[in-house]
Amino acid sequence: MSSTAQPTTTLWRPTGPVELDLVRALDWRAWPPRLPEQPIFYPVLNEDYAVRIARDWNVKHDGAGFVTRFEVDSAFLERYPVRRAGGETILELWVPAEELAEFNAHIVGRIEVVREFR
């Protein structure tokens, strides 16, 4: 009996040290709930965009920036239109905070840190 793996989409998220500690506390399997002033969770669709935010924004504001990579069930992601937040490669998904628990349930595997900036 063969099992067929569900297709997944690779997403990236630039993050600061506080959010990264919360992800670690969730065993690298989920994103923490949004704060009241964060109504949207923004994963991005390419590593270069995530690097720019982590390096240029998170380091300046938090002292460190990290780029994380994770896989999400592709069929589930179809509900979120890709948003262009600037240039051609500045692509992100907008996940309403109230849907984050359901989004987390569709993460396949673990969230991993792929880059670090200080």
Image (spheres, rainbow, N blue to C red):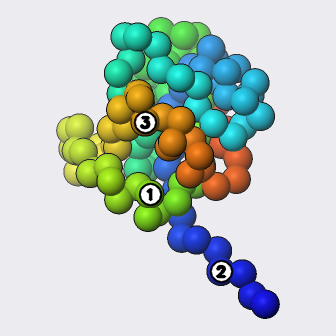
Disc 3 secondary structure class: helix
Residue at the far bottom: name it.
1
- Up the image or down, 100 lies above or below 89; here it is above
Q: Is residue 1 left or right of residue 72?
A: right
Going 22% across and 44% down the picture, which residue do you hit? 84
Q: Is residue 71 left or right of residue 57?
A: right
Label 2 and label 3: CA atoms lie apart by 27 Å
Dot 2 amino acid type:
Thr
Label 1 and label 3: CA atoms lie apart by 12 Å
Disc 1 secondary structure class: helix
Q: Nearer the viewer, mark 2 or mark 3?
A: 3
Label 2 and label 1: CA atoms lie apart by 17 Å
Point out the tag, 2 or 1, that comes first from the N-terminus: 2
* Tag of residue 47: none
Q: Which residue is mark 1?
A: 76
Q: Quadrant of residue 16?
A: top right
Disc 2 secondary structure class: loop
Going 50% across and 43% down the picture, which residue do you hit? 103
Q: Which residue is mark 2?
A: 4
Dot 3 amino acid type:
Glu
Residue 68 percent coordinates (x, y): 59, 39
Residue 73 percent coordinates (x, y): 52, 60
Q: Which residue is mark 3?
A: 99
Point out the tag, 2 or 3, that comes first from the N-terminus: 2
Residue 78 percent coordinates (x, y): 35, 59
Dot 1 amino acid type:
Phe
